[in-house]
């Protein structure tokens, strides 16, 4: 069976209406509360002319036949209501990087053909600079915050719009919910301009957003099975990254599918490790999501101070960037019994592989256990490479994969090639599969350094240097070399008070 997100959420909310759904320092929303707010949001959008749908079968893979709503918000309940309610109204919500300047924001709203924006007041001045330029933008709903900024001309307060909307879903609308309805995630633009990755909800749900059972990795077979499982919910999950990051809202929707509670930190405009641990202690958070060492280092430093009871915290999950082995080892030392998991995936593949580490194991970086559909393709994208193949290949995914990139037929064709009749997603990572089936992730091809004819993966060198206890952080890049064409340079931040020699660092890299 294929699923639609609105169908999944209403199934769970009907089964466990009183379970905690979203918890903040000032609000505690049940599944029934979020279901009602989401239905009101859907009605608010549809009453303003959004929600028409073109039959998916008549469209190319790079085309969308639905309206799009931009979520230009810090982490808050309104963000997740905007996603669930958008799906209920058959409108496609998408993520906005709230650090964009006006020019970047205008590009995004134009490229996405945004028909509506839900915006925090803090970002209203930037939106005001470009408000009249995107040709499709009709609706602006504004969420007040501590900035105190005034309501934008022509905008409406989000709360007023929901208060005037109906909490009852139209039965004809519910009957029309389809697994062909779209999910769209904008990439960060690290390999070019940001692109909207288009997925069928029927594909992204099992690929990354809760569509598989946690006990056996099998896809859900029915709404009845989801409803029955909901009685087991109650795990408390905290996504520390912003919801504009796919990994964060993927965790939230995994939580929704399993009737778990999504706990939000108090500080949402940056990562504040002390605040995160305070909320973990107060709310009994069980699983914490972070993004690589940028979050992991300040987090473990706060853990090492030992002034918080972290008995509830069972696992730390890193999505979007792997944790270095040194940070993992420090986490195990600071919190006995902790499980640390690195998840590997991308906007274009969903979840592909994972690495799970516990105390007593040799913590590593870059080695993963493949999940269903992961594959390695050869240089020319003509052959799938088997385990133990010596060559470096392209990391790919098949099965549940995206349709393509919004409005870009050429890039869609390049990123989603067909090999021997099977369609793959190949977003640009280099990897190999060892004889024992372990995935060795080498790094993004766009940051590969060609030196003397040798491919050197910057991320692999960074991971090696981070094994040295005196290295706090590192950035590796290539610079011109008369002899080699390019040579490898590492910019190293040292732990305070440490003074390793160049020879020691070179030995660690080796």
Image: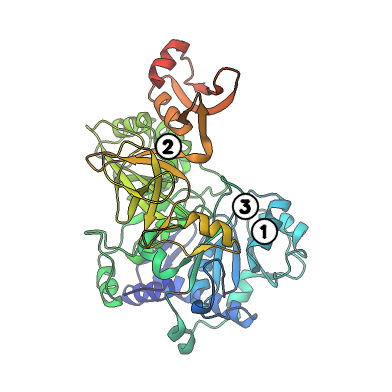
Mark 2 Cα shell of 10 Å, populated few (<14), some (14-19), many (≥20): many
Relative horizontal placement of residue 99, taking residue 389 as reference (left or right): right
Residue 105 drawn at (x, y percent): 68, 55
Mark nearer the viewer, 1 or 3: 3
Q: Which image quarter is the N terminus in?
A: bottom left
Image height of 136 relative to 302, above or below: below
Q: Quadrant of the rendered structure where residue 205 is?
A: bottom left
Q: Which of 481 and 312 is in front in this view?
A: 481
Can the viewer see residue 250? yes
Q: Nearer the viewer, residue 25 or 360?
A: 360
> Which residue position is annotated with label 1?
121
> Which residue position is annotated with label 3?
98
N-term mark: 1 or 3: 3
Instruction: Identify the mark at residue 296; answer none if there is no mark.
Output: 2
The alpha-carbon separation of the residues under discs 1 and 3 comes to 12 Å
Mark 1 Cα shell of 10 Å, populated few (<14), some (14-19), many (≥20): many
Marks 3,2: beta carbons within 8 A: no
Q: Which image quarter is the C terminus in?
A: top left
Residue 407 drawn at (x, y percent): 61, 64
């Amino acid at each position: 069976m294929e699923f639609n997100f609105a169908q999944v959420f209403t199934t769970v909310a009907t089964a466990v209406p009183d379970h905690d759904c979203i918890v903040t320092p000032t609000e505690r929303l049940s599944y029934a509360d979020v279901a009602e707010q989401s239905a009101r949001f859907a009605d608010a959008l549809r009453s303003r002319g959004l929600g028409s749908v073109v039959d998916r079968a008549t469209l190319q893979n790079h085309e969308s036949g639905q309206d799009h709503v931009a979520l230009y918000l810090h982490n808050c309940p309104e963000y997740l209501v905007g996603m669930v309610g958008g799906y209920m109204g058959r409108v496609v919500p998408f993520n906005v990087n709230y650090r964009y300047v006006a020019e970047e924001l205008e590009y995004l709203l134009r490229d996405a053909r945004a028909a509506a924006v839900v915006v925090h007041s803090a970002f209203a001045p930037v939106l005001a600079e470009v408000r009249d330029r995107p040709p499709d933008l009709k609706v602006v709903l504004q969420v007040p915050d501590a900035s105190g900024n005034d309501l934008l001309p022509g905008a409406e307060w989000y709360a007023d719009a929901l208060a005037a909307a109906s909490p009852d879903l139209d039965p004809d609308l519910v009957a029309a919910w389809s697994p062909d309805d779209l999910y769209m995630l904008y990439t960060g633009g690290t390999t070019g301009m940001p692109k909207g990755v288009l997925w069928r909800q029927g594909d992204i749900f099992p690929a990354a957003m809760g569509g598989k059972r946690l006990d056996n990795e099998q896809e859900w077979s029915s709404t009845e099975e989801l409803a029955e499982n909901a009685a087991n919910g109650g795990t408390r999950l905290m996504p520390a990254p912003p919801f504009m990051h796919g990994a964060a809202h993927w965790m939230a929707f995994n939580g929704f599918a399993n009737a778990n509670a999504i706990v939000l930190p108090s500080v949402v405009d940056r990562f504040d490790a002390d605040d995160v641990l305070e909320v973990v202690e107060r709310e009994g958070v069980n699983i914490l999501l972070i993004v690589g060492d940028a979050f992991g280092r300040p987090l473990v430093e706060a853990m090492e101070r030992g002034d918080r009871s972290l008995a509830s915290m069972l696992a730390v999950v890193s999505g979007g960037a792997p944790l270095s082995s040194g940070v993992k080892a420090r986490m195990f030392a600071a919190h006995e019994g902790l499980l640390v998991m690195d998840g590997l995936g991308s906007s274009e593949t969903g979840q592909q592989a994972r690495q799970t580490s516990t105390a007593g194991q040799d913590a590593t970086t870059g080695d993963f256990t493949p999940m269903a559909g992961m594959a390695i393709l050869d240089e020319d994208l003509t052959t799938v490479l088997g385990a133990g193949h010596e060559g470096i290949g392209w990391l790919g995914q098949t099965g549940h994969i995206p349709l393509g990139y919004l409005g870009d037929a050429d890039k869609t064709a390049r990123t989603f090639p067909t090999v021997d009749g099977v369609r793959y997603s190949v977003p640009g990572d280099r990897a190999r599969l060892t004889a024992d089936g372990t995935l060795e992730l080498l790094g993004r091809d766009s940051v590969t350094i060609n030196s003397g004819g040798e491919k050197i993966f910057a991320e692999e060198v960074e991971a090696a240097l981070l094994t040295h206890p005196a290295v706090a952080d590192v950035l590796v890049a290539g610079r011109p070399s008369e002899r080699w064409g390019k040579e490898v340079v590492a910019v190293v931040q040292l732990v305070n008070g440490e003074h390793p020699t160049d020879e020691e660092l070179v030995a660690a890299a080796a």
